């Protein structure tokens, strides 16, 4: 095994940060925080967090406890392939999809991930060869509305094409969940019950991460080996522990009002690591008006990293490169465990419970309420302006240019603000929308995040409501060319997608967060018009 696969490293590039982090590292070492975490001590985060922590710490030993899954996954994969079934579609959100996407992307094996309610993106997945398809339905709670919709749509599609649906559906869920009960009733092909004492964002090495990845052909045994190779290192109470070093550095920067953490890959060989780390860090720390906001950028030369200001810490995933203040190295399995340990330890330094998500449910409730309205999507509000292919909501303005100028001027004049672009679109067909992140970051000089809706609701959505109250939110929605019914449900995917956007915007507004929603009546034309308007403002 190569050297980089047997360890994890954290380099504090900035000598001043090294000095500032030392007292925090010393306090973690003196408190034996790392070894207590490895021993699953729920008292590390205070009395208020103890009950939750007591049932959320099994992730520290998954490199051992997940071993029995390896044989089960391989046996099922062999069975499926013998039947000509070699296309894996994963229906899951947040912790149920982000780790498998990173694992399979890094290993170069095919996995179709459905973490969307966009009808076009789901239709594209349905258009694949169903004769060769197995659907992995993955939900910890067993009641995730997006995942349940995907299950219903695919089950009908299988049946409509003369395929026995129950033989093509594999489930990953917690014991006793509604999905576990339904799976038994429906006699689905296989049910993997995950460890219920692991929260979704810490579940990369549970059945949620390993089952879809292994069925797609990833070497999940090697992944567990990589994590096992750093477990002793991460549980040591000494200054060489990379998790202690990382947590202390992030804690020291946060104390200096640098709450943004900017990720750029510098040749790690890991595909999309920042998207996984984004959920872990934002959902774990973004609460009680504090936290660390991950900002994932395109490259070390990208706006936000190359010009990171005093409010941000630049982290290189891979070798240290200017202007990174921190660099992390190691294999994917090692990085999973490193960041989980470091995030939990950072929670202790920040004085928060890293295992709850008190603000996530609010947006879900708002979306459900909108779906219950007679229109089915709550999309009956009138725009404040219509300009070409764009309708504007949430800000009084005569046209797009005026709305953008007002919104961005407010953001740039606010202290330590950040922008969040939230695109409720097709992340494959509308992929170029992601270019807005760099364009806005360059135009404003503000740290700018980009998230595809509704998947970000299961990751950074917690931070947006519960973290530092300095966010400005640009929502982008779009008319769907074609819609999909959700079998036995009173809504369509497009209706659900819009309700999720409106529900989240409503909750953000209730928290005093500024929201501008731009709705593309024609997606391609609307995006081109928005890009041109931003260029004209520069």
Image (cartoon, helix red, strand yellow):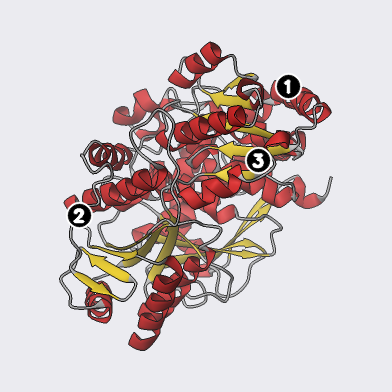
Residue 460 visible somewhere in the drawing? yes
Q: Place residue 222 in its image quadrant.
A: top right
Q: Residue at x 33, y 42 (%)?
A: 351
Q: Residue at x 33, y 46 (%)?
A: 500
Q: Residue at x 30, y 28 (%)?
A: 47
What residue is shown with label 2? 509
What's the distance in space between the residues labelled 1 and 2, CA to CA? 47 Å
Name which of mark 3 and mark 1 comes first in the sequence.
1
| Residue 278 vertical placement versus 17 (above, below) | above
Disc 2 is placed on an element classified as helix
Q: Nearer the viewer, residue 39 or 2?
A: 2
Total labels: the figure holds 3
Counting other residues with Cα less than 10 Å from the Cα at mark 3, is it few (<14), some (14-19), or many (20 or more)?
Answer: some
What's the distance in space between the residues labelled 3 and 2, CA to CA? 44 Å
What residue is shown with label 3? 233
What residue is shown with label 1? 72
| Residue 288 vertical placement versus 249 (above, below) | above
| Residue 299 vertical placement versus 376 (above, below) | below
């Amino acid at each position: 095994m190569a050297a980089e696969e047997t360890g994890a490293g954290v380099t504090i590039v900035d000598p001043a940060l090294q000095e500032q982090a030392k007292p925090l590292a010393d306090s973690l070492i003196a408190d034996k925080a790392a070894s207590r975490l490895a021993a699953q001590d729920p008292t590390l985060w205070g009395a208020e967090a103890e009950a939750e922590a007591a049932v959320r710490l099994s992730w520290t030993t998954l490199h051992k406890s997940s071993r029995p899954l390896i044989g089960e996954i391989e046996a099922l994969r062999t069975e499926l392939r013998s039947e000509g079934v070699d296309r894996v579609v994963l229906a899951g959100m947040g912790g149920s999809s982000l780790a498998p996407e990173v694992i399979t992307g890094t290993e170069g094996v095919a996995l179709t991930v459905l973490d969307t309610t966009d009808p076009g993106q789901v239709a594209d997945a349905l258009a694949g060869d169903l004769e060769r398809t197995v659907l992995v339905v993955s939900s910890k709670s067993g009641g995730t509305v997006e995942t349940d919709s995907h299950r219903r749509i695919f089950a009908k599609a299988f049946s409509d094409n003369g395929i026995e649906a129950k033989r093509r559906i594999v489930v990953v869920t917690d014991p006793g969940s509604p999905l576990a009960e339904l799976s038994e009733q429906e006699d689905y092909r296989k049910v993997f019950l995950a460890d219920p004492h692991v929260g979704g964002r810490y579940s990369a090495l549970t059945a949620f991460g390993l089952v879809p990845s292994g069925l797609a052909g990833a070497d999940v045994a090697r992944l567990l080996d990589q994590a096992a190779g750093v477990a002793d290192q991460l549980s040591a109470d000494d200054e060489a522990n990379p998790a202690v070093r990382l947590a202390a550095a992030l804690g020291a920067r946060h104390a200096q009002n640098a709450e943004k953490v900017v990720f750029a890959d510098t040749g790690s060989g890991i595909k999309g690591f920042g998207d996984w780390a984004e959920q872990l860090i934002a959902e774990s720390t973004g609460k009680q008006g504090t936290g660390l906001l991950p900002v994932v950028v395109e490259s070390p030369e990208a706006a936000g990293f190359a010009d990171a200001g005093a409010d941000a810490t630049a982290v290189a995933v891979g070798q240290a490169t200017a202007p990174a203040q921190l660099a992390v190295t190691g294999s994917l399995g090692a990085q999973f465990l490193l960041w989980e340990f470091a995030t939990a330890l950072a929670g202790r330094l920040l004085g928060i419970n890293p295992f709850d998500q008190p603000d996530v449910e609010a947006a879900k409730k708002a979306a459900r309420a909108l779906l219950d309205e007679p229109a089915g999507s709550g999309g009956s509000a009138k725009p404040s302006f219509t300009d070409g292919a764009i309708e504007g909501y949430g800000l009084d303005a005569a046209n797009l240019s005026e709305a953008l100028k007002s919104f961005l001027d407010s953001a740039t004049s606010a202290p330590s603000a950040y922008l969040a672009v939230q695109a409720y679109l097709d992340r494959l067909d509308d992929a170029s929308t992601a270019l807005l992140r760099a364009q806005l970051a360059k135009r404003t000089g503000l740290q700018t995040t980009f998230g595809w809706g509704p998947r970000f609701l299961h990751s950074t959505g917690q931070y947006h409501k519960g973290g530092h109250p300095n966010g400005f939110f640009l929502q982008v929605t779009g008319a769907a060319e074609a819609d999909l019914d959700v079998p036995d449900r009173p809504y369509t995917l497009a209706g659900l997608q819009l309700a999720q956007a409106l529900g989240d915007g409503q909750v953000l507004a209730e928290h005093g967060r500024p929201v501008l929603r731009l709705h593309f009546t024609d997606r391609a034309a609307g995006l081109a018009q928005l890009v041109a308007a931003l260029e004209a403002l520069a």
